[in-house]
Amino acid sequence: MIDFTWKLFSQTGNIETYLLLKELENNEAVEQNDQWQKMKESTSLNTKS
């Protein structure tokens, strides 16, 4: 989805498309951080047993 949004923005220069791109990138980063935190917590729980 990010690739498509970037391609659309690069072809149109539409600022709303660019803002959508940034929102998608931010959401992806948040999801990756959440997954990393869950993995870290899981690893931490396994080492305390």
Image: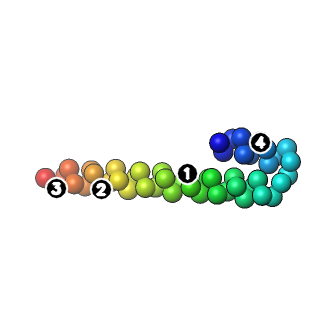
**Image point 85% across, 52% down: which residue?**
13
Kindly report the distance in space between the C-alpha atoms of the residues bearing marks 1 and 2: 20 Å
| Residue hosting label 1 | 28
- Where is mark 3, residue-wise? 48
Q: Which mark is residue 7?
A: 4
Q: Secondary structure at mark 1?
A: helix
Mark 3 to mark 2 CA distance (whole Å): 11 Å
Q: CA distance from mark 1 to mark 3?
A: 31 Å
Reading the chain from its start, which is encountered first: label 1 or label 2?
1
The residue sitting at 69% across, 41% down in the picture is 3
Q: Which amino acid type is marked by label 1?
A: Glu
Give the residue pinned by disc 2. Answer: 41
Helix, strand or loop for disc 4: helix
Q: From the top left corner, tell me how far across and down residue 44 is, in percent.
A: 25, 55
Mark in the foreground, 3 or 4: 4
Q: Nearer the viewer, mark 4 or mark 2?
A: 4
Instruction: Choose mark 1 or mark 3, whichever is in front.
Output: 1
